[in-house]
Each structure stands twice: as C-alpha cells, then as structure tokens.
Image (cartoon, helix red, strand yellow):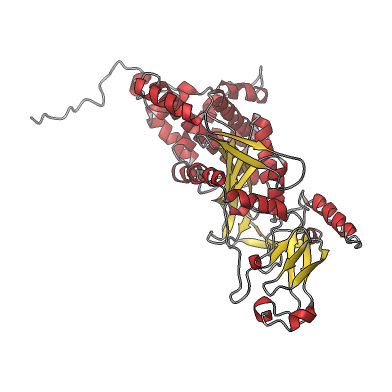
C-alpha cells in the first residue's frame, strides 16, 4: 500500500550520535581503527607558538582533510570543504560535530604555504605510515618493484622559452672515467683529455645505454662522459611551471610533465618510496639512490628487484649486482636496419676479447672511447673483398666497427636472469604490483595531474597520495585479517598455504670475484 510522504521528516528532531550514522565497514572508520595519526601533532609541534597567538586548528585535522581529498579523488580543496560540510562520515573522521564549522579552504593553502613548506612533514607522514605497515608485518621487503608514471604539469606546452642550461655530470661518470683510463692504460694508450664539467645546473639526461643493433652508441636523451663535459645544452623551459620538464617519449603524450618514481613491495604492493623529478629525466637516473634510501630508511632485507626495460642500462645493472641483488628486467627489442646482420650474429669471444663476423673474419679491439665503449674494428683489406660486405657495412673505408660497453658483463648477467624460471616468476607479479599501484592512483586518487606548480609541491602531492593509498590498503588488509581469525576454514587454509610457502626460500649467494657472480636459488 502506498502511503503519503512524510512532509516533516526533514525537520524532525532525533536523538542520534554521529557514530551511529557512519557504517561499520566505511573506509574512514577502518582507517581510524587501524592507523595512528597522533604523530602528526608531535612532528608539527615546533611549528606553532606555545604561549602566544589565537588557538590554532589541530594539524591532525588539517592533514586528515587532505587525506580525505586524496582517498576519494577530490582534487579541489574548495570542493573538499563543501563535501565535508554535508558528509557525516567525513565529519566523524575529522572529529567535528554536525554543527561545527569546517576549516576554510584558504586555511589549508595558507598553512601549506606559510607553515609546512620546507619542513618535510609530508615525507615524515609517508615514512611513518610505512613503518606502521612494517609493524603489522604487511611488508616483506624481499622483492621490490620500481617504475615511473607521468603527471601532467599545470602548464601549457606551447608556452615555453628555449634556454641554455649548464650540464651536471652524472654521479657515475667519475667511476666510468676511471675505468676508461685504466682500460686504455692496460692497452698502452694515452689517457683521454677531458673538459671540466660545470659544477651545477639542470639536465634532462640519464645514464648511458649500450650500443644499438649495429654497435654504435644510440642514446640521444642520455649523457655520456663526452656529452656531460659539454658546457651547456638547449632545452624547453615552461614559462608557467619552470620546474616541470618537456617530455618526448615513444607512445607517450608530449608536453610538460612530472615523473613519479615509485617503488612497491612484492607482498601486498605497499609503496615504500616515491620520488618526483621533471618529466625530461630518465627513469634510471634516480633509481639506485632511491633504492638505497628505501633499504636504509626501513631496514629492508632486499634480495631481488623487478624493473622494466627502461632501467636496462650499464650503470643500473652494475649497481644492482654490486649490491648483491638479483635483478630482473624486461626485454626491449633492439633497433635493426633491414638488410643488415644483427649484432648478435657477431660472436664475441671473452677469452681473446675479439669478435668474429658472420663471414669468419676476426674483428679486433682498437681502443676505448670516452663514452666507456670498447671499439672493435675489422681489417679493411679483407672487408673490401668480402661478398657479405653489403649486409655488414657501407662505410667508405670498408671497415666494420663494433662497440661493447665496459660494464657489458653486468648487463649480460641481468639479461640472463630474465630467462631463468626464477626470473620469470619474479617478473610476473610486476603488472599486479607496481602497474596496479599506478592504475589505482590515476583512476581513484586523482594522480593524472599535478595539482600544484613547482617540484617541491608536486613531491608533497605524490607523498600524500602514496601515503593514502597505503592507508587504504593497510586498513583493508588488517580488517580481512581480523575477520579471518574467526573463520576456522580460513585458518586451515592459511596454515596449509603457509606450510607450502615456507618451503620456497629465495636467497642470494654472492662472490667478490666480479660481475656475473650473483646467483639466486629457489629451494623447494
């Protein structure tokens, strides 16, 4: 029977508490149950005057307001305030009554600009959330996956200036130069003359890569020792957000972007590190420093890392193996010129340090260039009469030139790991961990666009966004764990699977004898 609508329902008085209006399984209730936020007040206490001025809004409330915006994808702080005004779950999470006034959006922006800028509080919040996850044993720390994603900067790609910037030498170049000098001295060659690089500046470059399919170093966007020694280079600098970088990559949008370099744990894909760079910085440039930071900050006993093909550079491969880690990287098919031999068809003999071409001619070592590549040259007299010369080289002096990086053995070891059964098993979860983390961030937490201008502000955005993703996952995992304690079938399942997993042990055996000595074993 259809009854008439109650016309006075909206104006009736009811005796209810705010706690009764929030569902027991609401995400904010789960987060409030399993996570502690009192540390925010302790870390910001020194930013407030103890005995003067008007009473301040609790910093925990301010940051909880930001957490709500990141958790539910509310990008505008003005809209966030309006949502909090009408949402009882948001009010409950902030500790506000139904009639309490919500802090204004300008309070958030002014506190961020005047009080919290330069304090590193966002990094402290992210680190503390990770530490709480470690306390609950949700982070294993044995396998880490790293990748980067782009955030569109708040800048028009057509508004820029062409500027000359001084080159900053990469951190690994001093070690590479020393290796080049030692290699040339062993071959009886004179040391190379190098130009002193500028001590500071802005660069969009990253580590050098190995040569292309025909042996020539192909890395236009990555520096070598020779390139880093140049005085300056020309880049596009945005007139709206000068800290952003002009990104030009295959199958990626073109414009001014930031890159969020993120590392997740292999157990539950919880984020253990996030770092922001301009969009024109190579993925491999900050990788080793961020890996070391995650290992030391949280005392993670890392045994293996999984990366995509963009990190497959000599410097990164060398760093992974020297740290005693088992590295697995994706494969990227090298470029190849139609009608010519593949580089793999030139057989390298490590004993004699020579190449043998498909026609059987020996290609001998002739020196090491300043980019760290060993050069191998054929005999022009034999190549001139070779019937396969058209498929080998078209140089005017009839000489085939091949290059091999000094740290190529490290790359070969990492590439060999990819083909093992263990390597395939380690690399397979990458799409379910780091790729899923980025997908959730973009679809659910407003991670497609930079909300602010300036590198420091975008870094704070990515830290808080990653912290909120971790909060959400920690709360859900701990809730499921608590529910499982009362389910006897689930306890039996966990006991059986735990016994099976305990028989699969990953450990690394290293030897200081040189590259290629790192081995991983899966004991069943």
28 or 302: nearer the viewer: 302
Image height check: is 40 above or below 294? above
Question: Within the image, what quadrant is residue 385 found in?
Answer: bottom right
Image height check: is 223 above or below 27? below
**Residue drawn where x is 59% and y is 33% of the image:** 141
387 or 267: nearer the viewer: 387
**Residue drawn where x is 66% and y is 34% of the image:** 295
**Residue drawn where x is 59% and y is 22% of the image:** 39
- Residue 286, image x and y in percent? 68, 46
- Residue 18, image x and y in percent? 37, 20
- What quarter of the picture does the N terminus occupy? top left
- Residue 355, image x and y in percent? 73, 66
Image height check: is 344 above or below 361? above
Q: Is residue 275 visible?
A: yes
- Residue 430, image x and y in percent? 52, 45
Q: Is residue 102 visible?
A: no
């Amino acid at each position: 029977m259809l009854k008439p609508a109650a016309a006075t329902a909206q104006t009736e008085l009811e005796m209810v508490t705010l706690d009764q209006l929030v569902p027991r399984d609401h995400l904010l209730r789960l987060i409030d149950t399993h996570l502690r936020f009192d540390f925010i007040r302790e870390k910001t206490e020194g930013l407030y005057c103890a005995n003067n001025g008007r009473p301040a809004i609790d910093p925990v409330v301010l940051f909880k307001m930001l957490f709500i915006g990141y958790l539910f994808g509310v990008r505008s702080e003005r809209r966030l305030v309006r949502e909090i005004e009408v949402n009882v779950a948001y009010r409950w999470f902030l500790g506000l009554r139904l009639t309490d006034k919500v802090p204004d959006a300008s309070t958030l922006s002014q506190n961020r600009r005047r009080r919290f800028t330069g304090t590193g509080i966002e990094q402290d919040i992210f680190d503390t959330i990770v530490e709480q996850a470690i306390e609950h044993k949700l982070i294993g720390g044995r396998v880490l996956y790293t990748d980067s994603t782009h955030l569109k900067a708040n800048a028009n790609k057509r508004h820029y200036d062409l500027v000359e910037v001084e080159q900053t030498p990469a951190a690994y170049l001093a070690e590479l130069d020393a290796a080049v000098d030692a290699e040339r001295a062993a071959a009886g060659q004179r040391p190379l003359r190098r130009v002193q690089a500028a001590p500071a500046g802005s660069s969009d470059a990253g580590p050098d890569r190995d040569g292309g399919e025909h042996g020539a170093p192909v890395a236009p966007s990555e520096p070598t020792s020779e390139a880093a020694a140049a005085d300056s280079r020309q880049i596009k600098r945005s007139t709206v957000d000068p800290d952003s970088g002009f990104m030009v990559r295959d199958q990626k949008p073109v414009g001014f972007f930031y890159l969020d370099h993120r590392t997740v744990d292999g157990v539950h894909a919880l984020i253990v590190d996030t770092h922001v760079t301009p969009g024109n910085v190579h993925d491999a440039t900050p990788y080793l420093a961020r890996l070391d930071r995650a290992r030391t900050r949280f005392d993670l006993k890392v045994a293996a890392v999984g990366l995509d093909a963009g990190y497959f550079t000599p410097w990164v491969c060398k760093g992974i193996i020297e740290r005693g880690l088992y590295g697995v990287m994706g494969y990227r098919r090298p470029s190849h010129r139609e009608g010519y031999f593949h580089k793999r068809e030139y057989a390298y003999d490590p004993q004699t340090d020579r190449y043998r071409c498909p026609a059987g001619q020996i290609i001998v070592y002739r020196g090491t260039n300043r980019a760290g590549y060993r050069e191998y040259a054929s005999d022009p007299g034999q190549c001139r009469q070779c019937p396969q010369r058209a498929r080998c080289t078209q140089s005017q002096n009839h000489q085939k030139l091949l290059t091999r990086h000094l740290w190529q053995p490290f790359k070969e070891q990492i590439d060999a790991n990819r083909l093992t059964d263990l390597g395939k098993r380690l690399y397979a979860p990458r799409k379910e961990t780091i790729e899923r983390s980025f997908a959730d961030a973009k679809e659910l937490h407003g991670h497609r666009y930079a909300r602010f201008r300036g590198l420091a502000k975008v870094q704070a955005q990515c830290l808080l966004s990653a912290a909120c993703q971790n909060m959400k996952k920690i709360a859900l995992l701990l809730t499921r764990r608590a529910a499982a304690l009362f389910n006897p079938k689930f306890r039996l399942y966990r006991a059986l699977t735990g016994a099976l997993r305990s028989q699969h042990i990953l450990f690394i055996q290293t030897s200081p004898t040189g590259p290629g000595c790192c081995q991983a074993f899966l004991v069943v």
